[in-house]
Image (cartoon, coloured by chain):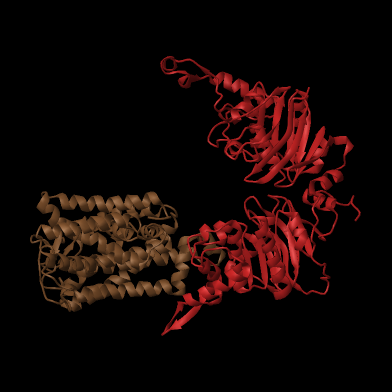
Chain colours: A red, B brown
């Protein structure tokens, strides 16, 4: 009998299906790999398994779950824990100022009765530190961890924190299934190797492991079976030795929908516009570690890759919003680094992935948002009265009215504050801002994140129009590969902070899959 | 119905409450046979007396440092400038002008220093400002005692140094602006600075108008816009290549300079220079006034200054006689404290969104 069976799991968030009839079976003691792109539905599936509040507050889910053949209906994470399911999250949930023992035993401390607790109840019992230490040592030993249990978490290397998290889970006596969410993402190579050994020995102890990752080689080497999710559907579930990494890559990326690919263009004649040499960007969570990239005049260059690999860092680095080193030249002239204003002056503009934080003044009007960058950097929308320049509100309004019409921004008027707009309309305001500024090179990050399908199409169409009609060079960074393949002339795939490959948009799916996973691509002959 | 709702939203809850309360008091004052001419003359004087201090809140809020609770730093320097002007023997208009001219460079330097301090404590400006205010006032309590002033009207009757707690400006530039081009002429009560009969203090109001116009023009300039953008969204400002810290220092400095000018106008209107603990209690009413006027912790306009100062000061002027008739002694002062602290509390709980 299977340890865990999830049958016909479906889930939608306000009408948007994120999981469609997913079946997942995990046997006792096996290592099961779960892979999929960002947004494929992996986290949602885990949230359902854990009975997270976010599932119930959005209308619950369909389908059933069985543990050892018994129906399992978790309504809160504690239910999952009682059923013997433990999870190690991608972000560590540890208290820095506490020792390893205290973290491992957090809220499950061994206690003994005291006079106080006899009067006021169990919550006031004393800590049985001896047992706590002994238990922790035992758990650490199981993981082959040679570290003192009284050390505080702060200052520990990241790899060790990961092990402490696991120690906490295996200290739970009834643990039968351990879920690891991208556990090796933060580990160095040697740490990762050690980690995988530990995982194997855990599974030999009879604990089933569900391993979520996007490193295909890793999952291939360690797992017994794998399941691939794509767009909320289960597209593959098989014994690992029956599939190749190539199959996995294809399954992960392949789209059933037709791409309306723009006409291919020959860019060999296009002159070099911007050259990036050995660029390092210290952007937390999206570090760039030495990228060389050439941007040609009049092209649309896509930048893709998985989350956390550094693709977001590239545009932020070029703009100088995070500490940067390396060399950037535009039309042969070397640019000053870490100087957003200098970049703007040189007609390079950036629409941030953080629309609400960096892209908009939420408590100002649409028209002011659209005009401000051009006003500040290019001295537009100013008029001279006597001896000084003042802001020309009339010109700002007129410009905004034109933009609202051209881009179909849905609003009550240009005076409306941008906070009240939907995500799609906010993005249109950002694009209007860039249009008003009139850059040579437009850097745009995650242009369609969090906006609905209709607005998505309009945003993408506008970008293509700007490129074709105004000759604007566009560098578009996106997590959605389909979107990049639809409009880009070339797609640069960033993995582990480095440029991994530059692909044609119509390159085969498996090539994209492997490139994003950071794997060698020599085995594919296209 | 939607019309009513729209109007209500435009006016806002605090202004509605205070406006209604003010109207009730005004009606009551009429039936209690309180002299209406005195009342309105006093309202106008109190308005002009306080408006520049309230105006000094505007650049601070727009630059993103929130309410400048540390007005005290500008205030003590304004007072020092006024004292120097008297010490040097100037009288009348000349004394007033010299006081203003001396106060500007001093408060500029102090404002720049204070601005740099605030850049190190982003997010805590109002708390830190409060404590710096307390420290500055306490420090000046020592300084007032040891400054080598020699004019007999300034220092204690006994001994050679030490400035008095309250210094009468009679004979130098007390009530100078109040009386400038005022019509119809009315006597001014020497102890309260309020009018005995109706009067329009043209000079006083005009001086405020000039200051307000200067701030308004600044707000519409490119620099003023850059300062506002720095204040409302730091990330956005950085991505537009603005030096956020520099604009914060600018806003803080403007606020400090206006506070110095404001206190000189306030003192001449009151007729007394108040030293030692007094500067501590001047930031709160100014903060309350601009918040009543509709400003938030993130947005402030000249209209907020005018509406707020008018509502707040009229309330005080009207409440005093009315409450004294129907109740006794200290009630008016209590109402003032409840209103001013209550409205600040209300604004702080509302955060940056609306007040």
Seen from this angle, which residue lies furthest bottom? A386
Image quarter for residue A467?
Answer: bottom right
Question: Which quadrant: the N terminus of chain A?
Answer: top right
Seen from this angle, which residue lies furthest front? B1
* In the depicted structure, whether residue A160 falls above or below residue A521: above
A278 and A350: which one is in front?
Answer: A350
A62 and A133: which one is in front?
Answer: A62
Q: Is residue B309 left or right of residue A57?
A: left
Residue positioned 27% across, 66% down in the render: B51
Residue positioned 91% across, 54% down in the render: A525
* Residue B187 visible: yes
Image quarter for residue A224?
Answer: top right
Q: Is residue A477 left or right of residue B62?
A: right
* In the depicted structure, whether residue B80 falls above or below residue B338: below
Q: Position of residue B166 (x, y in %)?
A: 14, 61
Seen from this angle, which residue lies furthest right? A525
Q: Position of residue A7 (x, y in %)?
A: 74, 32
A516 and A406: which one is in front?
Answer: A406
Question: Which quadrant: the C terminus of chain A?
Answer: bottom right
Residue positioned 67% across, 73% down in the render: A440
* Residue A325 visible: no
Q: Position of residue A70 (x, y in %)?
A: 70, 22
* In the depicted structure, whether residue B93 falls above or below residue A130: below
Q: Position of residue A369 (x, y in %)?
A: 53, 66
């Amino acid at each position: 009998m299977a340890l865990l069976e999830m049958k016909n799991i479906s889930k939608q968030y306000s009408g948007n299906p994120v999981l469609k009839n997913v079946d997942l079976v995990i046997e006792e003691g096996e290592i099961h790999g779960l892979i999929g792109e960002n947004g494929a539905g992996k986290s949602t599936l885990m949230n359902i398994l854990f009975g997270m509040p976010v599932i119930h507050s959005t209308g619950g889910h369909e389908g059933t779950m069985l543990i050892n053949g018994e129906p399992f209906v978790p309504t809160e994470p504690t239910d999952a824990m009682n059923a013997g399911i433990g999870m190690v999250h991608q972000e560590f949930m540890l208290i820095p100022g506490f020792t390893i023992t205290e973290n491992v035993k957090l809220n499950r401390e061994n206690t003994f009765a005291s006079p106080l607790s006899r009067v006021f109840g169990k919550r006031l019992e004393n800590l049985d530190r001896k047992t706590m230490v002994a238990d922790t040592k035992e758990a650490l030993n199981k993981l082959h961890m040679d570290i003192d249990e009284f050390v505080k978490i702060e200052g520990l290397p990241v790899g060790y924190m990961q092990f402490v998290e696991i120690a906490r889970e295996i200290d739970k006596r009834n643990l039968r299934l351990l879920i690891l969410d991208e556990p090796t993402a933060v580990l160095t190579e040697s740490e990762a190797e050690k980690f995988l050994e530990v995982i194997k020995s855990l599974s030999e102890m009879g604990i089933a492991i569900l391993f979520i990752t996007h490193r295909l080689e890793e999952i291939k080497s360690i797992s017994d079976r794998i399941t691939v999710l794509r767009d909320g559907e289960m597209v593959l579930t098989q014994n690992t030795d029956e599939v190749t990494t190539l199959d996995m890559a294809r399954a992960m990326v392949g789209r059933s929908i037709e791409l309306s690919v723009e006409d291919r263009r020959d860019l060999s004649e296009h002159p070099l516009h911007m050259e990036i040499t050995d660029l390092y960007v210290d952007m937390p969570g999206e570090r760039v570690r030495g990228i060389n990239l050439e941007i040609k005049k009049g092209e649309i260059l896509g930048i893709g890759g998985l989350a956390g690999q550094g693709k977001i860092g590239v545009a932020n680095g070029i703009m100088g919003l995070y500490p940067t080193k390396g060399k950037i030249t535009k039309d042969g002239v070397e640019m000053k680094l870490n100087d957003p204003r200098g970049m703007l002056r040189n007609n390079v503009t950036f629409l941030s992935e953080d629309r609400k934080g960096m892209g908009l003044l939420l408590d100002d009007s649409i028209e002011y948002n659209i005009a401000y960058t051009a006003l500040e950097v290019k001295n537009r929308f100013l008029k001279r009265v006597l001896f000084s320049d003042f802001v020309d509100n009339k010109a700002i309004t007129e410009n905004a009215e034109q933009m609202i019409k051209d881009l179909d921004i849905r609003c009550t008027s240009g005076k409306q504050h941008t906070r009240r707009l939907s995500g799609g309309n906010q993005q249109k305001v950002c694009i209007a801002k860039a249009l008003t500024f009139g850059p040579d090179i437009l850097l745009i990050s995650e242009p369609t994140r969090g906006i609905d399908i209709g607005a998505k199409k309009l945003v993408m169409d506008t970008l293509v129009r700007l490129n074709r009609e105004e000759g604007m060079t566009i560098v578009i960074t996106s997590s959605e590969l389909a979107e990049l393949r639809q409009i880009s002339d070339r797609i640069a795939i960033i993995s582990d902070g480095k440029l991994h490959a530059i692909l044609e948009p119509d390159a085969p799916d498996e090539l994209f899959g492997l490139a994003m996973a950071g794997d060698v691509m020599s085995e594919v002959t296209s | 119905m939607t019309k009513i709702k729209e109007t209500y939203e435009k006016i806002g809850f605090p202004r509605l409450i205070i406006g209604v309360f003010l109207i009730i008091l005004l009606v009551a004052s009429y039936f209690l046979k309180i002299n209406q001419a005195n009342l309105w003359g006093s309202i106008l004087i109190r308005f002009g007396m306080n408006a520049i201090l309230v105006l000094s809140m505007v650049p601070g809020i727009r630059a993103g440092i929130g309410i400048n609770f540390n007005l005290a730093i500008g205030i003590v320097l304004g007072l020092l400038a006024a004292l120097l002007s008297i010490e040097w023997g100037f009288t009348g208009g000349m004394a007033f002008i010299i006081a203003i001219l001396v106060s500007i460079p001093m408060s500029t330097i102090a404002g720049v220093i204070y601005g740099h301090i605030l850049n190190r404590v982003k997010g805590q400006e109002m708390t830190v400002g409060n404590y710096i205010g307390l420290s500055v006032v306490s420090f000046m309590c020592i300084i007032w005692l040891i400054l080598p002033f020699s004019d007999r009207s300034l220092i204690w009757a006994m001994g050679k140094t030490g400035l008095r707690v309250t210094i009468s400006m009679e004979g130098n530039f007390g009530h100078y602006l109040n009386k400038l081009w005022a019509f119809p002429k009315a006597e001014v009560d020497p102890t309260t600075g309020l009018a005995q009969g109706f009067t329009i203090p043209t000079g006083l109001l005009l001086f405020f108008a000039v200051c307000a116009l200067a701030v308004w023009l600044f707000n519409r300039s490119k620099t003023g816009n850059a300062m506002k953008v720095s204040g409302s969204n730091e990330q956005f400002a950085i991505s537009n290549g603005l030096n956020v810290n520099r604009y914060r220092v600018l806003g803080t400095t403007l606020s400090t300079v206006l506070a110095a000018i404001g206190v000189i106008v306030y003192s001449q209107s009151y007729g007394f220079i108040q030293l030692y603990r007094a500067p501590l209690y001047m930031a709160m009413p100014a903060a309350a006034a601009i918040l009543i006027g509709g400003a938030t912790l993130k947005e402030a306009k000249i209209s907020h200054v005018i509406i707020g100062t008018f509502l707040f000061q009229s309330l005080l002027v009207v409440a005093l006689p009315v409450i004294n008739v129907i109740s006794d002694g200290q009630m008016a002062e209590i109402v003032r404290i409840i209103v001013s602290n209550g409205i600040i509390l209300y604004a702080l709980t509302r955060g940056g969104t609306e007040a």
